[in-house]
Amino acid sequence: MIDLYFAPTPNGWKAAIMLEETGLAYRPILMQLGKGDQFSPDFLKISPNAKMPAIVDHAPEAAWGDDPVTVFESGAILLYLADKTGQFAPHKGDLRGRKELMEWLFWQVGNQGPMGGQLSHFRNYAPEDERTYGFKRYLGEYDRNLGVLENRLEKRDYLLGDYSIADMLAFPWAFIAKPLGASLAAFPRVADWRSRIKERPAVQRAIDLHKSEQNKGRHRADNNTVLFNQSAASLKPQGKTGD
Ligand SMILES: N[C@@H](CCC(=O)N[C@@H](CS)C(=O)NCC(=O)O)C(=O)O
């Protein structure tokens, strides 16, 4: 059994999609991010960056030893699950395939994800009189990353040829283009790829997971001191220092 620390957001969906696709038994643990569940001392032991998704695998393969395996960061989670199941990633002996997987995994978690996250911040959370520059900047970067996807999909249906964890990582941020204030109209291959992935039953189950909690607790950043305006002090249990 795998515990999935989850909230219904693009980054949460990535891990839920992979768990649904592989059919691994898992237990979703809903996190109330607006209430600060991510700063609880127990969760920080699993995810020191105080962000979900994270997983705890209580039945890892024998080579991992007896203790449960904790994994934070969506890219690391999907790679761990791909290695565990032998599914949705090039075989370890396929060096060129593995290299391309790493390229697209790091591209997603270092580019498309953070730019989409900042775009969401300036569209949905920033005080209205401080939105304009940030929104323009991150919409441009979000669009640029859609262009990267569009070019990559010119010669293949999925990022690595076959459907893989690279697609599961990138899909959620393209899925929410419209609510981010962006458009796929200029990216027809991305739009088709998004539709193909969205139709997968496993993807639909993941997107429906705790759907009623979606966007709950959405507040303007200047009215929310839990989700925003954090400092390193939030990462110390009860704000204690020195341990
Ligand atoms: N790089 C991380 C990003 C995860 C992330 O940003 N998660 C957000 C929700 S989408 C979160 O937990 N936010 C809580 C907070 O910022 O306090 C990953 O890919 O897993």
Image: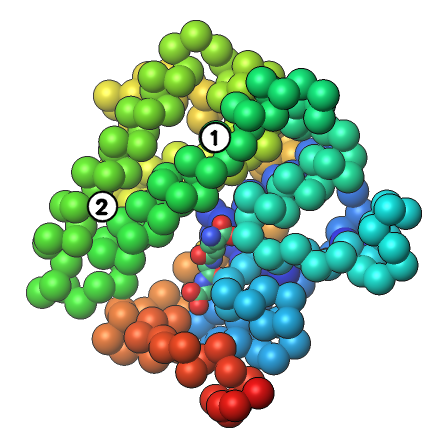
Give me the disc on residue 175: none
**Coordinates of residue 160 in the picture (x, y in percent):** 54, 19
Q: Residue at x 26, y 69 (%)?
A: 220
**Coordinates of residue 201 in the picture (x, y in percent):** 64, 31
Label 1 near label 2: C-beta < 8 Å? Answer: no
Q: Residue at x 34, y 20 (%)?
A: 150
Query: Based on the displayed image, in which of its 4 quarters is residue 18 positioned?
Result: top right
Foreground residue, 13 or 70? 70
Within 10 Å of the Cα at label 2, are there few (<14), some (14-19), or many (20+) other Cα atoms?
many
* 112, above or below 166, in the image: below
SS of the residue at dot 2?
helix
Circle 2 or circle 1, nearest the eye: 1
**Coordinates of residue 234 in the picture (x, y in percent):** 45, 80
Q: Is residue 236 left or right of residue 215?
A: right
SS of the residue at dot 1?
helix
According to the image, label 2 marks what residue?
138
Q: Is residue 64 left or right of residue 134?
A: right
Q: Residue type at mark 1: give it.
A: Trp
Foreground residue, 74 or 225? 74
Closer to the chain start, of discs 2 and 1, is 1
* 201, above or below 232, in the image: above
Q: Residue at x 64, y 66 (%)?
A: 46
Q: Which quarter of the image is occupied by the N terminus? A: bottom right
Specify whether residue 12 is in view: no
Report how far apart the C-alphas of labels 2 and 1 lie in the structure: 20 Å
Specify whether residue 116 is in view: yes
**Coordinates of residue 190 in the picture (x, y in percent):** 38, 22
* 101, above or below 236, in the image: above
Foreground residue, 28 or 154? 154
According to the image, label 1 marks what residue?
104
